[in-house]
Image: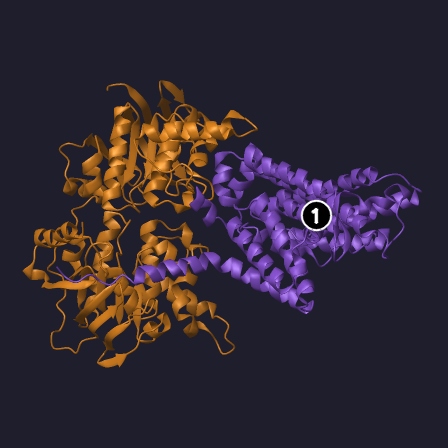
Chain colours: A orange, B purple
């Protein structure tokens, strides 16, 4: 296992004068699993695109299988066995598994006719290579994200990949699915196929990596064997400073103040039952539990998307009925959804339009036209306050990176000045640096008197931001804990205990 | 396997056809006869041929409404041209010239779409209006009933005839063979050629299709070429079956053809559809039209019926979803252990 398959030498690349990569070198051995780690904008994606031939470096060489390239093209890169699995997997939802697997080969061979028998045979052989079984005649649209990913991996193998690059492959996977993906990656390793695994989930990196490379601001800041590397060290290299995990700044809510939100025996048939709690101004209340424990359904009920069918909700002492999102908004309840792309943003619209969409009524003049000045003022204010990284609020929301999109969703809700904010897994898919600043933001909002419901299964996150925690299991509140009274380990055990029950 | 068939949208269309036939048959037993079958088939010939062409566009992810104008241009243009030359021969030359005209009109649309990267619907809206205007301004604006001698008996050339107690002699027109041949060809194109799979691929995910290396523009040109040729073919066939040529042929019928393709299980958003389904969609629409006559319901109800069936049909996926949701809701929260 000492055959070097890829060497990137002193590569630099600048976009409009901004250095995305600065004198970076990289090597990859046959059968090696290399983890590429870094915050958003650290140059990871640029590096992938240079290896796959999409970008040409301004300087430096790429050597694959001993062939040196100054200007690598995508075709040459593929011919050398480089296959990139992008986050969208590049599959056709309306075609069968078998066809998706074989379609690239069909095209590159230049054949005009389709031999279905051959197609199925090849597809089956491909799936056997990675020891998975997925029905070949199923439509890709019917498959889970995890299965789609396996199809994408198989497709790469069928294209005779020697180097497979996976860009944030675990973002949408469950714990179990991540484990089987890792099995597949180890399988590839045994066949001598190298993997470049791009991620910012550090616990996964420690689990899968042979070697870890960390980028920061376009430079390689660390490159070492993964064996004696802990998460703290990685975080240090990624951010360039020790992350501030001090809990002392957690504001204490005023215990005397009247509760902002009181929920009593709330229930929704088949989803959750008998949920009761109080939320005070300035308090961050964590709601946790495994997927399917009812945590998300509870949030959606409070936000009126799928209204509860029993129990009462009181906002600032007044009993209210929340049957729709409009009801929730009238009571100044805001919700930041889990899947920011699907539920939270109008990706084609500009950043500032996204910010003002909830308060558009306040932005209009007498004849109901939008006052451009007012909307710009508000959106610029929020872009500044939440540190959304963008040159202009007039760019489309899709131009932002994942972490910044998440901030934009927050900005959108904060602009409407909610009293109660429900956050559903606010830091999923966000790198550690942005995560820390989102946590700080949550604490800040609470200290200004907002009541926050934080739904998450990220235990360290809960411990760093919440005053109290509610553990949900199978649609019921299983326990309420003050943060001081419980440790990460205990909480972890409580959650795992549920897993044992649910088998 | 059986489950797959039952779940397919073709099966739904087929079921609706069967149920509708039973209902009509119970109200009016005269419906159950070979004469009815022949009649429905005859009425389906022209629409099917156009629908097969349109099917390709819809699978590729577009909607075209100008194909009816291609049909009018090709049939009426060819007829007026040959008439002025004193042509008195058979029908073959009609088909040959019309198909060339249809191919040209189709390719023109295709070129505009691919060259300027425009939405198919927008282009077809412009082309439809343009071609009908062109016909009436440059070719003629009145119906013409003069047929060439070589084609006079064409409308009653039957494959088989039966004696029917209600309508006397009834025959199956031989041009149903065209539908069969064209249908098989289009089916094979879609299923067994790289080009056909490319049509599905671009309808399913255009970006990925481009990234995978499909020649999107070339594929679209072929699709429009076929649409043009088939529309022209249908236009000529219709004119001979109805024994007259008209400048505004099919002018208001494009939506019926689109409805048939969608009833046949094609998805308006692209990537889905089949020849067999489309043919059944056409049959279903013709059946509804016949049903009105045979059960004595007035013509005004036809459109209402077609609309209702269509509304029901396109709601099926949503209804399925709803049923699944209900089923999952019915599960009570388990009691605590």
User: Label 1 neighbourhood size at 10 Å, few (<14), some (14-19), many (20+)?
Assistant: many
Residue B226 horizontal side relative to residue A491, left or right: right
Q: Residue at 19% x, 58% y: name it.
A: A288
Task: From the top left corner, tell me how far across and down residue B156 is, in percent.
Answer: 81, 47
Tell me the residue that label 1 is attached to: B45
Q: Residue at 23% x, 43% y: name it.
A: A176
Name the one closer to the observer, A211 or B92: B92
For residue A48, above or below residue A432: above
Does the rendering let one see residue A28? yes
Q: Residue at 28% x, 49% y: name it.
A: A430
Name the one closer to the observer, A380 or A193: A193
| Residue farthest to the right, as pictured | B86
For residue A215, above or below residue B47: above
Secondary-structure class at tag 1:
helix
Does the rendering let one see residue B268? no
Task: From the top left corner, tell me how far across and down residue B205 is, in percent.
Answer: 49, 44
User: Callout 1: residue from which chain?
Assistant: B
Name the one closer to the observer, A311 or A320: A311
Residue A488 horizontal side relative to residue B67, left or right: left
Residue A216 horizontal side relative to residue B111, left or right: left
Task: From the top left corner, tell me how far across and down residue B201 is, in percent.
Answer: 51, 40
| Residue farthest to the bottom, as pictured | A318
Residue B185 horizontal side relative to residue A106, left or right: right
**Where's the N terminus of chain A, which quadrant?**
top left
Determine the image quadrant of residue B194.
top right
């Amino acid at each position: 296992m000492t055959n070097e398959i890829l060497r990137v030498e002193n590569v630099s690349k600048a976009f409009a004068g901004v250095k995305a990569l600065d004198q970076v070198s990289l090597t990859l051995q046959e059968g090696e699993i290399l983890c590429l780690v870094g915050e958003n904008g650290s140059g990871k994606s640029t590096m992938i695109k240079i290896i796959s031939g999409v970008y040409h470096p301004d300087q430096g060489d790429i050597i694959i299988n001993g062939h040196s390239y100054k200007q690598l093209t995508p075709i040459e890169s593929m011919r050398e066995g480089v296959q990139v699995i992008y986050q969208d997997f590049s599959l056709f939802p309306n075609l069968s598994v078998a066809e998706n697997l074989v379609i690239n080969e069909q095209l590159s061979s230049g054949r005009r006719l389709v031999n279905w028998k051959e197609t199925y045979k090849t597809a089956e052989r491909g799936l056997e290579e990675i020891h998975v079984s997925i029905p070949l005649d199923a439509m890709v649209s019917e498959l889970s994200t995890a299965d789609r990913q396996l199809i994408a991996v198989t497709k790469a193998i069928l294209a005779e990949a020697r180097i497979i690059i996976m860009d944030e492959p675990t973002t949408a996977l469950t714990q179990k699915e991540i484990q089987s993906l890792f099995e597949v990656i180890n399988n590839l390793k045994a066949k001598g196929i190298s993997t470049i695994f791009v991620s910012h989930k550090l616990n996964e990196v420690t689990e899968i990596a042979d070697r870890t490379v960390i980028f920061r601001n376009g430079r390689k800041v660390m490159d070492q064997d993964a064996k004696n590397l802990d998460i703290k060290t990685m975080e240090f290299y990624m951010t360039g400073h020790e992350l501030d995990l001090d809990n002392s700044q957690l504001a204490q809510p005023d215990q005397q103040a009247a509760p902002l939100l009181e929920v009593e025996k709330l229930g929704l048939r088949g989803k959750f039952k008998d949920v009761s709690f109080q939320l005070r101004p300035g308090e961050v209340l964590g709601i946790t539990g495994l997927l399917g424990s009812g945590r998300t359904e509870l949030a959606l009920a409070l936000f009126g998307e799928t209204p509860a069918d029993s129990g009462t909700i009181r906002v600032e002492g007044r009993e209210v009925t929340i049957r729709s999102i409009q009801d929730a908004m009238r009571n100044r309840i805001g919700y930041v959804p889990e899947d920011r792309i699907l539920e939270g943003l109008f990706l084609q619209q500009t950043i500032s339009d996204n910010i003002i969409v909830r308060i558009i009524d306040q932005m209009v003049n007498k004849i109901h036209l939008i006052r451009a000045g007012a909307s710009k003022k508000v959106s610029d204010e929020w872009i500044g306050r939440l540190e959304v990284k963008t040159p202009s609020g007039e760019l489309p929301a899709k131009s932002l990176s994942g972490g910044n999109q998440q901030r934009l969703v927050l900005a959108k809700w904060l602009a409407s000045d909610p009293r109660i904010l429900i956050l559903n897994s606010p830091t999923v898919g966000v790198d550690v640096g942005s995560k820390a600043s989102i946590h700080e933001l949550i604490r800040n909002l609470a200290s200004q008197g907002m009541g926050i419901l934080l739904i998450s299964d990220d235990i360290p996150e809960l411990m760093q931001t919440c005053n109290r925690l509610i553990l949900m299991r199978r649609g019921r509140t299983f326990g309420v804990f003050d943060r001081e009274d419980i440790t990460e380990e205990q909480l972890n055990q409580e959650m795992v205990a549920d897993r044992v029950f649910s088998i | 396997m059986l489950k797959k068939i039952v779940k397919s949208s073709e099966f739904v269309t087929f079921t609706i056809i069967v149920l509708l036939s039973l209902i009509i048959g119970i109200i009016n037993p005269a419906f159950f006869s070979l004469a009815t079958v022949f009649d429905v088939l005859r009425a389906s010939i022209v629409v099917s041929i156009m629908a097969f062409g349109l099917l390709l566009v819809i699978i590729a992810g577009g909607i075209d409404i100008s194909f009816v104008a291609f049909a009018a241009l090709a049939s009426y243009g060819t007829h007026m041209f040959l008439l002025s030359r004193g042509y008195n021969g058979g029908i073959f030359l009609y088909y040959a010239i019309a198909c060339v005209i249809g191919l040209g009109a189709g390719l023109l649309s295709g070129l505009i779409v691919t060259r300027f990267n425009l939405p198919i619907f927008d282009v077809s809206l412009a082309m439809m209006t343009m071609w009908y205007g062109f016909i009436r301004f440059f070719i003629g604006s009145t119906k013409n009933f003069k047929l060439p001698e070589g084609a006079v008996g064409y409308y009653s050339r039957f494959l088989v005839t039966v004696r029917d107690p209600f309508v006397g002699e009834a025959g199956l027109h031989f041009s149903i063979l065209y539908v069969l041949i064209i249908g098989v060809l289009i089916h094979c194109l879609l299923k067994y050629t790289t080009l056909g799979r490319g049509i599905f691929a671009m309808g399913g995910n255009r970006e990925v299709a481009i990234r995978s290396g499909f020649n999107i523009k070339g594929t679209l040109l072929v699709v429009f070429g076929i649409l043009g040729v088939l529309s022209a073919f249908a236009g000529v066939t219709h004119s001979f079956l109805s024994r007259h040529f008209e400048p505004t042929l099919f002018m208001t019928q494009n939506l019926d053809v689109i409805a048939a393709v969608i009833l046949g299980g094609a998805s308006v958003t692209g990537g889905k559809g089949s020849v067999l389904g489309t043919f059944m969609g056409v049959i279903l629409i013709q059946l509804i039209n016949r049903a009105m006559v045979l059960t004595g319901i007035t013509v005004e109800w036809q459109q209402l019926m077609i609309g209702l069936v269509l509304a029901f049909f396109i709601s099926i996926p949503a209804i399925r979803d709803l049923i699944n949701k209900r089923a999952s809701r019915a599960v009570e929260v388990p009691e605590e252990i």
